[in-house]
Image: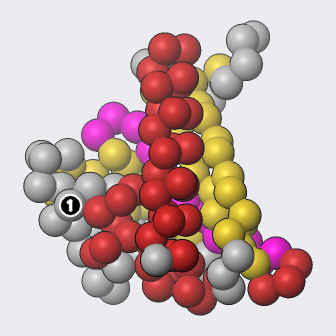
Amino acid sequence: MPTGLTRDAGWQIGVSHTLPHPPTTVWEFVSEPPGLALWLGTGVELRSPRRGTTYRTDSGVVGEVRGYRPGERIRLTYGRTTVQVTLTPAEGGRTVLRFHQERMADARERERQRAHWREVLDDIAVALDG
């Protein structure tokens, strides 16, 4: 089976970056509108989200929250794919921020999304260092 292809979730990609900020700082950013705009799209607010809560970005992408653990994880559909953002505490007060996307159409989409998530992680790092 090719790298990135699974039986259950189709094509998937995961990228991560260790940030020099504590998990609470990173969570506050990625779960609020300025951070959500960087990784999910503008116009989205996830206030008290529960499984089944729907959202719509300004660009028209529609999705549904599949899981939400404050300070730890957000899992949601993004169009026909599923995206999960996860925070893990790291040594020295740092945070590992991970993006995982599954159910992509093919290897080309997987590679496009790998580049996309790397850029998102860079943008988040710059914004937090602001």
Q: Nearer the viewer, residue 35 or 86?
A: 35
Q: How is the image coloured?
A: secondary structure
Numbered range of the magenta stretch: 79-90
Locate residue 58 relative to residue 13 in the image: left or right: left
x 20%, y 46%: residue: 61
x 20%, y 61%: residue: 42
Residue type at mark 1 is Thr
| Secondary structure predominantly adopted by residues drawn in magenta | strand
Q: Of all residues shown, which one is farthest toward the top?
A: 1
Spot occupied by residue 57 in the image (x, y as percentages of width and height) = 18, 56
x 65%, y 20%: residue: 5
Q: In the figure, 33 relative to 108: above or below?
A: below
Give the class, few, some or many, for how many residues have Cα within 10 Å of label 1's Cα (few <14, many ≥20): some
Whether residue 61 appears in this view of the structure is yes
Spot occupied by residue 14 in the image (x, y as percentages of width and height) = 64, 42
Locate residue 19 relative to residue 45 in the image: left or right: right
Residue 20 picture quarter = bottom right
Q: Which residue is mark 1?
A: 42
Spot occupied by residue 66 in the image (x, y as percentages of width and height) = 43, 60
Q: Nearer the viewer, residue 110 or 80?
A: 110
Q: Quadrant of the N terminus?
A: top right
Q: Could you say whether the residue bearing mark 1 is in a helix, strand or loop?
A: loop
Q: Of all residues shown, which one is farthest toward the front?
A: 130
Whether residue 64 appears in this view of the structure is no
x 36%, y 59%: residue: 38
Spot occupied by residue 55 in the image (x, y as percentages of width and height) = 21, 62
- Say how many tags the image has: 1
Q: Of all residues shown, which one is farthest toward the right?
A: 91
Residue 95 picture quarter = bottom right
Residue 84 in magenta stretch:
yes
Q: In the figure, 21 relative to 110: above or below?
A: below
